[in-house]
Image (cartoon, rainbow, N blue to C red):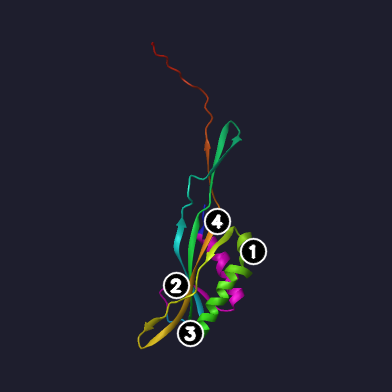
Amino acid sequence: MLDLLEVRKAVVSELYSHLGTRVEMNNQIASKKEYPFLGYAFTSSYIADNGHGIYTREAAGDDVAVTKTTFPRLTLSLTAYDTDPDNAFQLAKKAHGWFSFQGYDYLKSNGLVVVEAGSIENRDTLIADDYERRQGFDVQLRTTERLTMTVPAIETVQIERSEG
């Protein structure tokens, strides 16, 4: 099963170490944050894999264990916040580099594969009388999901015959 808490822990802790600045969930009710920081949000928490998945069956005593394996994706939106537009861009660029290069193997070892790290775009917004400088991008990650169930063995079969 896809566990967003585990995904979040894996990404945030290592990204924080790489950037050396705070990495916080967006849209939190809190007091004004100090700059700079990187905000994140799961904009698509579960994008279903195309097709029906890969089914495997194996004996489980007298029963059969059936496993369905799929490869869902999720989209993580990242935004660098600062009062200076150049600093916001540099923070976003450093985070982008982690997803597309430095953190790739780490993520893979935690069951996440970077499908795409999108373009860095301006996400500035006017707050009161001043602009908050924002630069951001989206990352699409793929993971493996395995669903299992046990199917009881068929012990008896009733056959009815009809004439004709």
The dot on residue 130 is none
Query: Residue at the location (42% across, 73% down)?
Result: 28
Q: Which residues are magenta?
A: 4-30
- The x and y percentages for residue 141 are 53, 61
From this viewpoint, which residue is outermost toward the front?
A: 119
Task: Assess whether mark 4 and mark 3 are in contact (beta carbons under 8 angstroms).
Answer: no
Measured Cα–Cα span from mark 1 to mark 2 = 26 Å
Labels 4 and 1: the sequence-earlier one:
1
Q: Which mark is residue 85?
A: 3
Q: Quadrant of residue 55?
A: top right
Q: Earlier in the sequence, mark 3 or mark 1?
A: 3
Amino acid identity at mark 3: Pro
Element type at mark 4: strand
Marks 3 and 1, how far apart in space?
30 Å
Task: Examine the rendered structure and indicate whether residue 49 appears above or below residue 33.
Answer: above
Residues packed near mark 1 inside 10 Å, few (<14), some (14 to 19) or many (20 plus): some
CA gap between label 4 and label 1 equals 14 Å
1 or 2: tag closer to the N-terminus: 2
Q: Residues within 10 Å of mark 3 (few under 14, many from 20)?
A: some
Kind of residue at badge 1: Asp
Which mark is first along the chain, 3 or 2? 2
Sooner in the amino-acid sequence: mark 2 or mark 4: 2
User: Which residue lies under the disc numbered 1?
Assistant: 105
C-alpha span from label 2 to label 3: 19 Å
Q: Quadrant of residue 160?
A: top left
* Residue 143, numbered circle: 4
The residue pinned by badge 2 equals 26
Density class for disc 2 (Cα within 10 Å; few <14, some 14-19, many ≥20) is some
